[in-house]
Amino acid sequence: MPQAADSPTHPRVLIAAFEGWSDAGSAATTVLQHLGELINAEMLHAIGADGFVDYQVHRPKVSFTDSGHRVIEWPETRLYGTVQRPGSTSEPSTETVHRIDGTRVQDLFLLAGVEPARDWTAFAEEIIDVVDSWAIDMVILVGSLFSDAPHSRPIAVTLTSENAELRATTGAARSDYEGAVGISTLLDIALTEAAVPVLCLWAQVPHYVHTAPSPKATLAVLDKLEELLDVVIPRGDMLSEATAWEASINRIAAGDDDMARYIRSLEEARDATNAPEATGEAIAHEFEKYLNIDPDENPNAEPGPLSTP
């Protein structure tokens, strides 16, 4: 099997995201789709859906091959990466993930799938095996959650890690959350126990626009990944999509006085939190509001990674 490789001076990084509870506004999985297109990712490995996925929730799909045969596509968890083949001399494109000196990033791996419905422990063991087999140096778990965040302000992202060295080099905090969690939190703990450095990156998506994709949240995650990995990630049309997304919400709010008042209250709370004179206690209070989410009432909310600064 051809394997992705790069200079040994650069770590091999796996970025993972899962559809479901931890993918508010499809912001996290859209990050993987965008990165996959940029690096021309190919599937390297698949974790079968049997035993993990509830097919009544995530149904298999049928499609036709070029020869006209019907095939079933199962909701597997798939590892993607850039494949280097002997004799390949393709010149790096400007529309790819590259380092500051212009060299292509070929040590980036993507893990995409749906949140498993059962046997999370066995699923975590599968992920650990993948990390070990492909000599992954670090894992970044990406998620998004609905919160009382105003769409008109920069999307807030949080970064946590159990790894002291990563906290020192990235500014990540250590999560002090206790309560219901999603598969990302379980993987964070399992990978940490397996001595794999892990970062958890989360974006806060305005809950009052949860019916539409959130390109602004995806853009915020890409901005943070670019900073963490010290690479350049082309945004394509994402900036214009985020601008159009915000403008469309503004138009809706302009015709709905209750919605407009509610958004103004969120803006005032966010501005007060970000003000230079804001105390640590006030900031902690804002984050506690995000944590007080009942997952039974909002199944897409993933409170796990948030912690007070």
Image (spheres, helix red, strand yellow):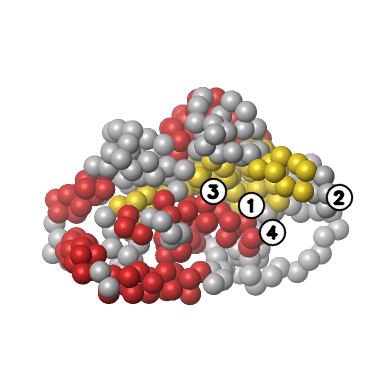
Residue 34 lies in what quarter of the image?
Answer: bottom right
Residue 253 coordinates in the image, percent (x, y) = 28, 70
Task: Find disc 4 in the rendering and name its residue.
Answer: 40
Q: Name above or below for residue 125 compared with residue 219.
A: above
Query: For mark 3, what is the residue?
Result: 15
The amino acid type of the residue labelled 4 equals Asn
Single out the mark in the foreground, 2 or 4: 2
Q: Which residue is mark 2?
A: 67
Sequence order check, earlier mark of 3 and 1: 3
- How much space separates mark 3 and mark 2, taking CA atoms? 35 Å
Whole-angstrom CA distance, mark 2 to mark 4, is 25 Å
Amino acid on which disc 1 is placed:
Asp
Which residue is depicted at the point 38% across and 74% down? Answer: 247
Alpha carbons under labels 4 and 3: distance apart: 15 Å
Q: Is residue 129 visible from the viewing direction of this image?
A: no
Q: Give the label, 3 or 1, closer to the camera.
A: 3
Mark 1 highlights which residue? Answer: 107
Image quadrant where one finds the N terminus: top right
Determine contact: label 4, label 3, CB under 8 Å.
no
- Report, in whole angstroms, how far the alpha carbon at label 1 lies from the one at label 2: 35 Å
Task: Give me the disc on residue 151.
Answer: none
Q: With 120 as the anchor, is 49 left or right in this view?
A: right
Badge 1 element = loop
What is the distance, in whole Å, between disc 4 and disc 1 at their CAs? 12 Å
Q: Which secondary structure, mark 2?
A: loop
**Mark found first going from the N terminus, 4 or 1:** 4
